[in-house]
Image (spheres, rainbow, N blue to C red):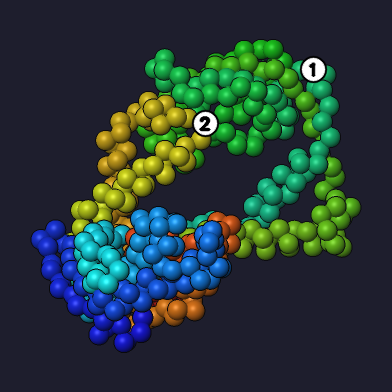
Amino acid sequence: MANDDKADFKVIETRQEDGKLVLSVEVEKDVVSQAFRTVHKQLLKHVHVPGFRPGKIPLPVISNAVGRENFTKEVRKELLPRFYYAALETTDRRPVDRVEYVVETLAHGQSFIFTARVLVAPDVKLPDYHKLKLEIEGEDEVDDKAVEKTLLRLQQDHAESSKAEDDVVADGDFALISFTGSVGGKEFKTLSQENMSVVVGNDDFVAGFDSNLVGKKKGEEFTFPITMPKKGTENEFLVGKKVMFKGKVKSVYRQTLPELDDDFAKKFGEFENLDALKEKISRDLEKRRESKMDTAKRGAIRKALAAAVEVTVPEELVRGRLDDRLEEFKGGLKDLTFEEYLEEFGKDEETVSGELREKVVDDIRADFALDFVAAAESLAVTDEELEDRIVAMARMLQKDPEEILEALDESGQRLLQKQDMLREKAFDSVMETYK
């Protein structure tokens, strides 16, 4: 925004009790006339009117040709974001949500008058963020047992399978089963499978499940209870519950594992011997462990920031994000409709909204804390960095960058995008403290 623009408009700032800032803006008529001429010049390249030479069509004629409403809409796009951002520079308040515009006057030869209403950031205080108390759940160290387990999986992936002559399930066999899981007579879809393949002994489904299959024959039906463990049980409603599994063994295949030797190692790349493969597996497992620890640390830092910051979270911001989060949650469900999820997990929509609300509030609190960090450390996002981000967004969405920028400016989100980038820098700065 050129500094010269500040002389081209007047702004009246009003702060509302609901935390919103109202900017009443009047743009000089000469600036408006120039905007009309700019749009006229742009349309001359694309509009053809019978009886007029290309590039020589008067403004009123072009306006009628494209429709006055469409012409004015283009002028609005030329002026509105520009002077909304300029008006914001006259205040010390920072928007935290999309802006609502009301255009009062926009006509050739007249002043442009509009109102912008936007929720702004509340006051924020944050104690020393270099001394946060982090709660991080550790990851098991990579040991020989972990490497051996990975090697076993590789052997199983390359095993030769043949029909079990005795048709009896043994540890290490490949079995095809169908079953249902129910609690108190109520069947749970997430605990029921049709034609599920299992390598018996790996316990990939529920801890203790596989051992109940050992000794069963092809075609034999089975029934056994399992008390659901806390670890690995996604549905918290089921933890500690006794689940009755009923099903049938459909087929049994015996697996012949390849020898675990140097020749086996050479199948997976340029490994001279089995020890070299083991070393590579160990390094990969360690990288995976470090990645999990990094993710856990990031989550712990955001949680600690949310707990430490002193701020009153705007209810309107919570409601808006909660609506978005609920829709994301519904769209992210696999194999279940939202109604089926509620029944399966013993919840109602109000309970789900309440759980999501807690997460939304914590996310907002953490964001405000990071805003404090960014200001305290005088962090900044350059126009070039923002442009690179928009180009990346356009590439991902397979759209033109100008189209993305126009969509952002339509609701004043260019500044919100910039603020998100500032928060990323602030978070990286905090992370450095806890390396």
For marks 1 and 2, the one nearer the N-term is: 1
Residue 81 image offset from top left, x and y in percent: 34, 68
Residue at point 42%, 35% (across, down): 235
Name the residue type under label 1.
Asp
Residue type, mark 2 in image = Asp
- For the N terminus, which image quadrant? bottom left
Q: Secondary structure at mark 2?
A: loop
The answer to which of 320 and 430 lies nearer the viewer is 320
Horizontal side of 47 relative to 60 (left or right) equals: right
Residue 373 visible in image: no
Which quadrant would residue 351 be assigned to in this image? Answer: top left
Which tag is nearer the camera, tag 1 or tag 2?
2
The percent coordinates of residue 430 (x first, y second) are 39, 74
Circle 2 residues within 10 Å: few <14, some 14–19, many ≥20:
few
Give the CA separation, mark 1 to mark 2.
36 Å
Task: Name the one closer to the observer, 53 or 141.
Answer: 53
Q: Residue at x 25, y 85 (%)?
A: 7
For image coordinates 31% across by 87% down, the residue present is 4
In the foreground, 317 or 236: 317
Mark sitting on residue 166: 1
Q: Which mark is residue 335?
A: 2
Farthest residue toward the right?
A: 263
Callout 1: helix, strand or loop? loop
The residue drawn where x is 75% and y is 58% is 278
| Residue 164, percent from left and from top | 80, 22
